[in-house]
Image (cartoon, rainbow, N blue to C red):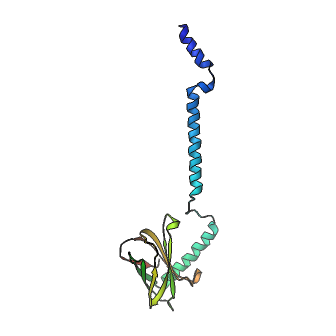
Amino acid sequence: MTTGTSMIDDAASSPWYKQIWAWVVIAILAFAVFIGVGLLLVATMNPDSLVRDDYYSEGKAINMTLDRDHNARDLGMAATFSIDEVTGDISLQLDGQLSALPRNLTLDLISPTHASRDRSVRLQQISGNTYTGQLENRIEGRRYIELNDPDKPGEDGWRLTGELQLGGSQRYQLGAH
């Protein structure tokens, strides 16, 4: 029995760095620090593009865009457009009670999740209420759509908005809300 107690005494009297459980605990802590630093690096290199810093300016801008939405509704504005899948040509017909049709329009195709996938196309009037523009890259999937007159920003302008599932050769409609 003297040999059993001497083994326990030898394990208890050996230095900490020779104990396996000390190294297991240190390894767990080191792994947690390594993972934490890795997640911190990923978070700083890929910031969230959906978070806005200037809430006051955003609130003022929301009120301005609501006025533009009301102006579009009062004018009975509507638009129908199509995107050619192969060439990227956009053809748009604008309807409404405008005193004069704008010479140019801006069509914004906004991705709900990635700001880098947003596209803005300038449409030029080709005749009457028909406008055309060119989309550089093929686009498909869910998008928020915004159509407006770039020469009338602010409260005097109008804006048509919608949420569409783009893809295939089909016609899309926007109306005033």
Above or below residue 3? Residue 62 is below
Residue 46, horizontal then vertical, whole percent:
56, 58
Instruction: Give 59 or 132, whichever is nearer the viewer.
Output: 132
Please state the total of marks drawn on the protein image: 0
Residue 89, horizontal then vertical, whole percent:
42, 80
Residue 65, horizontal then vertical, whole percent:
55, 76
Most extreme residue toward the top is 1
Residue 119, horizontal then vertical, whole percent:
50, 73
Left or right position of 126 against 156: left
Residue at 61% over, 27% down: 17
Instruction: Give 173 or 48, whichever is nearer the viewer.
Output: 48
Above or below residue 19? Residue 174 is below
Instruction: Give 54 or 115, whichever is nearer the viewer.
Output: 115
Above or below residue 23? Residue 172 is below
Most extreme residue toward the left is 169
Q: Quadrant of residue 152?
A: bottom right
Residue at 54% over, 79% down: 68
Q: Quadrant of residue 92?
A: bottom left
Instruction: Give 156 or 137, whichever is nearer the viewer.
Output: 137
